[in-house]
Each structure stands twice: as structure tokens, then as C-alpha cells.
Image (tube, rainbow, N blue to C red):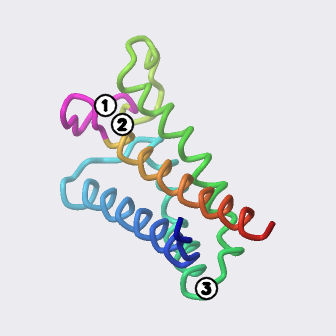
Amino acid sequence: MKKVSEETYLFIAWAIALVAMAGSLFYSEFMGFEPCEFCWYQRILMYPLVLIYGAALWKKNSEIALPGVIMSGIGMFVSTYHYLLQKVPGFAEGDACGTVSCSAQYVNYFGFITIPFMAGTAFVIIFVTHMTWVFQKRRTTK
């Protein structure tokens, strides 16, 4: 099996984070969808990933990307909870997210793809990419 380079993993994580950031900005700035409280939490976790993985890629040093795997791991749980608020009846009882309801669905592609679903998918891809690189590195250093 051919070994994938460290830069390739860093590039994939960076590109996914960049696309996710651009997508969230598109929905809020161009489509006019106001982010709810959990959307802001997901942005707080996603936007720095562009800088973290970008810096690691630029310096060719994956060790500085460690916060990225932690933030993407936390982001997976935040996105999952937000998605459950939207899709599971009774989960959003007493939705006290502020001026914008966290259970509101601005988009609902194919009946299940919402904004938290897209963010969660990005967090999962980034986390799995990073962990795949970590396991590959451990396997090759033994």
C-alpha cells in the first residue's frame, strides 16, 4: 500500500475546513440566514481550523496541528447535538437558543441534509483525516 504524504493529509483537512467556512459565510452573508447559538459554536470550532491546518501545511509541520484534531472532535459532538435538535421531535422542547431557534431548518436537502449536518460531516472528515495520518505515522515509525 502506498504511503500518503503528511502534506496531503494536511491539505485535505485544510481544504475541508476552508470549504466549510466559506459555506457558512455564504449562508449567512449572501443568503441572509441568521446563525443560531449552536451555529456560532460550530463556527468558533471550524474557523480556526483553516488557520491551524493552513499554518501546519505552510510550515510542513503537522505537530502544530494537534489542536485541530481536538477542535474537530468537539465539533462533531456539537454538530450532532444541533442536528438532533432539528430532527428529533421532543429534543428541542423549550428551545432557548435566543432570537434564532436552534431547531430552525433554513435548508433541508433530500430531507436530511441541514446546515448542522454539513458542519458535522466536515468535522468528521477533518477528524478522520487527522487520525488516519496519526495512525499511519505510528505504523511507519515502528
Q: Is residue 35 magenta?
A: no
Q: Which residue is mark 2?
A: 100
Location of residue 103 in the rendering, given as x and y in whole percent from the top left corner: 36, 28
- The residue furthest right is 142
Question: Is disc 3 surrounded by few (<14), some (14 to 19) or many (20+) residues within 10 Å?
Answer: some
Residue at the spot 58% in from the left edge and 72% down from the top edge: 52
User: What's the magenta region?
Assistant: 102-114
**Predominant SS of the magenta segment:** loop
Q: Which residue is mark 1?
A: 104
Q: Report how far apart the C-alphas of labels 1 and 2 lie in the structure.
A: 8 Å
Residue at the spot 56% in from the left edge and 38% down from the top edge: 77
Q: Secondary structure at mark 1?
A: loop
Q: Nearer the viewer, residue 105 or 84?
A: 84
Amino acid type, residue under disc 2 in the picture: Val
Check contact, mark 1 vs mark 2: CB within 8 A: yes
Give the answer, above or below, for where 71 lies relative to 117: below
Give the answer, above or below, for where 10 lies relative to 109: below
Q: Nearer the viewer, residue 23 or 95?
A: 23
Question: Is disc 2 surrounded by few (<14), some (14 to 19) or many (20+) residues within 10 Å?
Answer: some
